[in-house]
Image (spheres, helix red, strand yellow):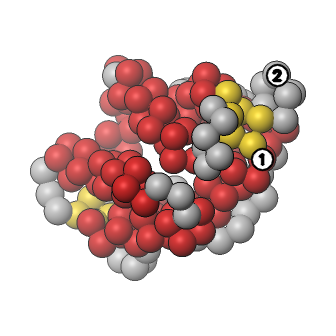
Amino acid sequence: MFTAMDADGDGYLDETDFRALTARWVSMRGGDDELLSGVMMGWWATLAAASGRDRVSIDDVLSIVEALPKTPEAVTSTADAMFGAVDENRDDYISQPEYQAMISAWLGHRASTDFPSLDADGDGQLSREEFAELWYEFWAGDDSSAAGTYVFGQV
């Protein structure tokens, strides 16, 4: 994920990288530009504040991620904001096409995902609760076999 977010490839994340990520989101998905910008730039503000610098290394990100299990509410509130950004038709579910748009926006290119393995109840969509669980498993979980480990596909 770090490499996907490092838009200029300099080995650090900075505000410019997050603005590029935001632009990818808006151009690939459209929708509520203000919501998307708020989610993406909010993550940058959190990373910058936690590191105390205006550019963040992968080690900084990993140390922040290591602390996430201690603050599950931070992870789930971020999942909720991301859910709102991804749920383009506002039906309170994420469809496979909406999910694919999220992956493409994050990575900057189309990548394969195994959506059915993420869809725990097999109904062809992700509820807010399913998405939050997957998000937590990716960012704060420690079970490498959990479905959320592949929330961003094979990166």
Secondary structure state at the residue bearing disc 2: loop
Please give the name of the residue rendered at 75% of the width and 43% of the height, measured from the top-left corner: 95
Q: Which residue is mark 2?
A: 121
The residue under the point 13% across, 50% down is: 52
Residue depicted at 69% across the width and 49% down the height: 99
139 left or right of 43 in image? right
Q: Real-space Cα distance between discs 1 and 2?
A: 14 Å
Give the x, y percent position of residue 67: 33, 30
| Image location (x, y in percent) of residue 53 | 14, 57
Looking at numbered disc 2 in the image, what kind of residue is underneath it? Asp
- Ranked by sequence position, the earlier of labels 1 and 2 is 1
Pointer 1: residues within 10 angstroms few (<14), some, or many (20+)? Answer: some
Residue 9 picture location, percent across and down: 42, 77
Q: Going 55% across and 34% down the picture, which residue do you hit?
A: 135
Position of residue 124 in the picture relative to residue 12 (left or right): right
Q: Nearer the viewer, residue 64 or 27?
A: 27
Please indicate, yes or no, whether residue 34 appears anywhere in the rendered image.
yes
Check the image and report above or below for 109 versus 152. Answer: below
Q: On the image, numbered disc 1 is attached to which residue?
A: 96
- SS class, disc 1: helix
- Apparent side of residue 133 relative to residue 73 in the rendered image (left or right): right
Task: Examine the rendered structure and indicate whether residue 67 appears above or below residue 13.
Answer: above
Which of these two is toward me, 64 or 117?
A: 117
Residue 1 is situated, as x and y percent measured from the top left of the image, at 52, 56
**Where on the picture, by quarter, is residue 103?**
bottom right
| Residue 154 position (above or below residue 127) | below
Looking at the figure, which quarter contains the C terminus?
bottom right
Q: Amino acid at mark 1?
A: Gln
Instruction: Report whether residue 139 is seen.
Output: no
* Mark 2 burial class by Cα count in 10 Å: few <14, some 14-19, many 20+: few
- Could you tell whether 63 is left or right of 108 in the image? left
